[in-house]
Amino acid sequence: MQEPLSKRARRRITRRLIPFLFIVYIICFLDRVNVTYANLEMTRDLNFTSETYGFGAGIFFIGYFVLEIPGTMLVERWSARGWIARIMISWGVLATCMGFIHTAGQFYAVRFLLGAAEAGFFPGIIVYLSHWFRDEDRAKAVALFMAAVPIANIVGSPISGLLLGVNWLGLAGWRWLFIVEGGPAIIFGVVTIFYLTDRPSQAAWLSEDEREWLVEELRIERQRKSEARSLTVLESLRHRGVIVLAVAYFFIITSSLGLNLWLPTIVKSISGLTNFQVTLVSALPYCFGLIAMIGLGWSSDRTKERRWHTVAPMLVAFVGLVLSTLVSSNPFLAIAMFCVAAAGLFSYFPSFWALPTGFLSGSAAAASIGLINSVGNLGGFVGPFVVGFVKEATKSFTGGVLYLAGSALVAAVLVLMLRKEDCVLTEG
């Protein structure tokens, strides 16, 4: 029996695009968060305080904020592969430069520039996926793509642990961590130019009937959204749903990146393990996050429900983070609670990013996704900085972790404030 056209086309698109995007996002996320593992040695070598590290880790997202919306618009109106390639090459160079810093000022400057270099990458990919996947398939596609986040930590943790133990050419292991992990971004940036295809109409790797089917399906989808809600770019940026999602994402990212950028240091402080053992243990929560993310993405598409698939993980994260502070004297239980929190902090991604593309399309969707991600990622500055500030003031991580828990709870409440029509797929 001949395979249905729609199934054949969707399978071919998924196999062509998702593995490559998955790999480049692993590289991206490694270069963003490898500072968490370098921190196990870097702050001691450079005499940085917890507050200095928290500020430097978070300032990445200030640079990220500056160019986010323009970068996302370029993916929609110009070339996804061109912009993604530019991002990867420039961030690879800057990630390598992190291996040569000596002062707090240099740390802040390179982290800021690294954020500016990466601006537009993640929301650009979300927009790019909307060029290839229908609304009803998008949460699964986002889940498969974003599985790179926990996997980057699972794979990156032991690699970073091994690199921390080397001393080549008189350079400490934490410096080699940045130098070695910056190179793949440059290589894959060049490959991107030749591998990715901007639009389905240009996809020579699809058969003619597959190409025509996808182009027509996406055209009908855009037309339906346009008829239901015809919004300009400026109108979309003022849309209530977009504003609520941007603020909610700020609190989500405050919680998730606050934990992500401090987790190895917290684990070391409560366990007394060696650096390599810390990196291995720190990978465990991301294993739970990966399983939860894939499962919730599939469930969200199957039920066509987005809001509660976003809210429930945030409530789980809140509970896990609060409980981790109550059992902090028992390292085994504390790490188990971090696993619960990570399951929540990763599994909201697929359903959350299906929300704005469910009621917006084209330039309006690109601008809105850029706004949501840029405002949200300011939380990537606030979360790590607050944890570092509280740690410096109280000599304990408890207050900072409770702040991250509260942020997760606020995010859940905000998503519940969305109106029903902004949380369901547009009906045909």
Image: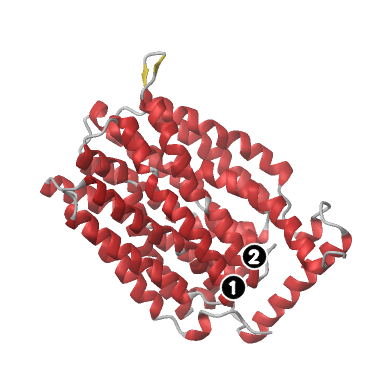
Q: Is residue 123 left or right of residue 264?
A: right
In this rendering, the count of numbered labels is 2
Task: Look at mark 1 in the image and give the residue it sits on.
Answer: 302
In the image, residue 182 above or below residue 377: above
The numbered dot on residue 39 is none
For numbered disc 2, what is the local secondary structure?
helix
The numbered dot on residue 130 is 2
Query: Looking at this rendering, what residue extends furthest in the top direction?
Result: 169
In the image, residue 308 above or below residue 149: below
Q: How far from the left and from the top, in percent, is residue 76? A: 64, 61
Q: Nearer the viewer, residue 407 or 95?
A: 407
Tell me the residue at 44%/49% (across/down): 287
Q: Tell whether label 2 touches label 1 (CB within 8 Å).
A: no
Earlier in the chain: of badge 1 and badge 2, it is 2
Q: Nearer the viewer, residue 241 or 351?
A: 351
Q: Nearer the viewer, mark 1 or mark 2?
A: 1
Regarding residue 379, the answer to whether it shows in the image is no
Q: Is residue 6 left or right of residue 29?
A: right
